[in-house]
Image (tube, rainbow, N blue to C red):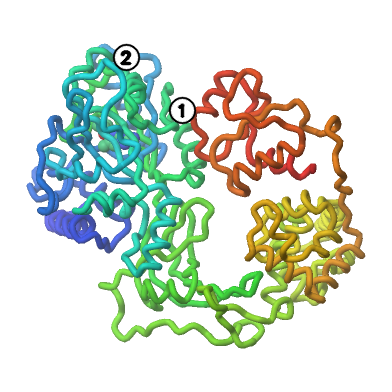
Amino acid sequence: MGLCQSQQDYLQLVDTLNRHAHRYYVLDDPEIADAEYDQLYQTLLKTEEKHPHWITDISPSQRVADQPSDAFKQVQHKTPMLSLNNVFNETDMGAFYQRLVKRLEQADMHTDTIRFSAEPKFDGLALSLTYEHGRLVQGATRGDGQIGEDITHNVRTIASIPLQLLGDDIPDTLEIRGEVVMPKDGFERYNKSAEQRGDKTFANPRNAAAGSLRQLDPRITAQRPLEFYAYGIGLSNMTDHFDNHSQILNWLKSLAIPVHDSVTTLAGLSECVDYYQQLQTKRADLNIDIDGAVFKVDNLNLQNTLGFITKAPRWAIAYKFPAEEATTIIENIDVQVGRTGSITPVARLKPVTVGGVTVTNATLHNEDEIKRKDVRIGDTVFVRRAGDVIPEVVKVVKQKRPAGSQAFVMPTQCPVCGSDLYKPQDEAVWRCPAGLACDAQKKESIKHFASRKAMDIDGLGDKLVDQLIDAGLIDSAADLYHLTESQISGLERMGQKSAQNLLKAIKDSQQTTLPRFIYALGIREVGEATALTLANELKTIEAIEASSREELQQLPDIGPVVAQKIWAYFNNDANQQTIQALLDSGIRWPVIEQQDADNLPLKDVTIVLTGKLSQLTRSEAKQGLQKLGAQVTGSVSKNTDYVVAGTDAGSKLAKAESLSVEVVDEDWLMQQLSQQ
Ligand code: 5U1
């Protein structure tokens, strides 16, 4: 993060930032990623701090945001909507803490460790709600912090925002501040159906939330999945009733205003840093986008003492996550062949850091996506990398397209085996028809076979599978079980010890479970949950092979498409030979017997399911647990033995923790279910 060396550089930076802000707020068509904007803005702030006499009144630091659109009535906020100062690393977070300590000491208000309210920083649209005598009378955007846009008609369609507050102790006028977000699953669903209708799709959930709230017709907003999370209040005559900010948030909850479950209180710098790190780990599993953590001095007296600098409170800070989006240039477009023959175009990128990791490849999904986004070699593009998800190209910056660029043309032949590609009806992807005769599909299917949730062959990574096939040592998954130490140790980067370890892991994998084996076969549409259903319902591989499509369709959560895929797999001669070869090479699993009720492994065990599960539905989990003898109930009490907490688990998890009930995760659940 630099500093402007001359006043001319500074004025140029002001100009650049204003241009980007206009593209972002007014045109809804940014040219640079938020993180790049943030960096430029930090340079501006640092320069202005060093050279205050340079500050011009058109600097973005001299106003909070951009103009409200003319389409909505403008409204004056009763108290200004503030902004937050940002930090991007632990050192600056520490410096923030030290500034607090110093100021409080100077004011003779030193507390040993400062207590904070810790909250997620929601990546949505800021909203101010006004309630008069408990009734919602206004919803307004932030605008410039003083004057926002009246979007009451749209806000009234957000189901989680109460039109009437609950409780008796309600002030005459109450302003509530928070953020509107579109949950990630709702965003995916919305974009999919918009694409089918030929409507505009959104680049990310934040744009989707903002676009949905800025509709002139509230019936359109009503169809969008929006949520609101409060993080504070503006005008009220209630502040005397509270000592701490966290009490205010609890009070809001009691009025039926949504407050996010991750909000908590903590003490001192190290707990803030822990919270930030935990939130960052949880980030990918949350169903809403967040871009950091917010820490607010909890005590309202201390807040008053600390006060404000221009538009931001001194007592609060946003500790931002490394950006998930960045811009870079597409140097080439290749296609990759997946396990099931799907052809995926991949952008080869000029290396760029996204979310703290260097990214050189990003998926372009399929031909339709390339056409829709009009992605070309040489384009400057936005790349997004969220959590463990494969980086993707989100959007092209058309203004930066080099002259003479050509639209991308999908190849007509498999880049690995040369077979003619085909595009099945009703599918967006092209496919290579060669199956395991194509080296790419062979490699991918063996990688899947060896993976953790399948045969779990420790140490057999992607590179090693490539090496084994390229060296002609294996041609199928069954060949793994005939490898010798000298063959493996002869490979590049493989010594005797690592060869022995790998052989042991391969041998250990021979003793497996039927669900794992079915999953490892890599049948299309058969994930872990379906593999589990097949094993639990039909008990043997012979029974699965002998089932008709109609019989398969009778099984829980197996529809006609999946039934057809399973049936087709087992009624193919080559697949039959694969299974036989695997069994001949020594793979075994415990016989699944009809359990008698008294011997069930979870007899007399009471379990509560909460939060979202990723591998199976709640009803599948419930059925599976019941088959093992468990009682699955809806609420947590001291009689509960286990609470299975998926992602976004809410009050049941909190209750389990308060009653010291053992909390377990989805891995535990899958492990129990695999005993059936
Ligand atoms: N979670 C959270 N986000 N956020 C944004 N809290 C919070 N507080 C804010 C803002 C602008 O402002 C207050 C510190 C006034």
Residue lying at 23% horizontally and 46% vertically, measured from the top left: 154
Residue lying at 70% horizontally and 43% vertically, measured from the top left: 670
**Towards the viewer: 448 or 164:** 164
Q: Residues within 10 Å of mark 2 (few under 14, many from 20)?
A: some
Displayed quadrant of residue 261: top left
SS state under label 2: loop
Displayed quadrant of residue 151: top left
Above or below for 409 versus 313? below
Residue lying at 17% horizontally and 47% vertically, measured from the top left: 65
Q: CA distance from mark 2 to mark 1?
A: 18 Å
Residue 270 circle label: 1
Question: How far across and how far down the image is residue 250, in percent?
Answer: 36, 22
Above or below for 310 versus 104? below
Q: Mark 2 — residue?
A: 110
Above or below for 111 versus 220? above
- Earlier sequence position, callout 2 versus callout 1: 2
Beta carbon of the mark 1 residue lies under 8 A of ligand 1: no
Question: How far across and how far down the image is residue 311, in percent?
Answer: 17, 35
Q: Quadrant of the C terminus?
A: top right
* Callout 2 amino acid: His
Question: How far across and how far down the image is residue 478, in percent?
Answer: 84, 67
Displayed quadrant of residue 305: top left
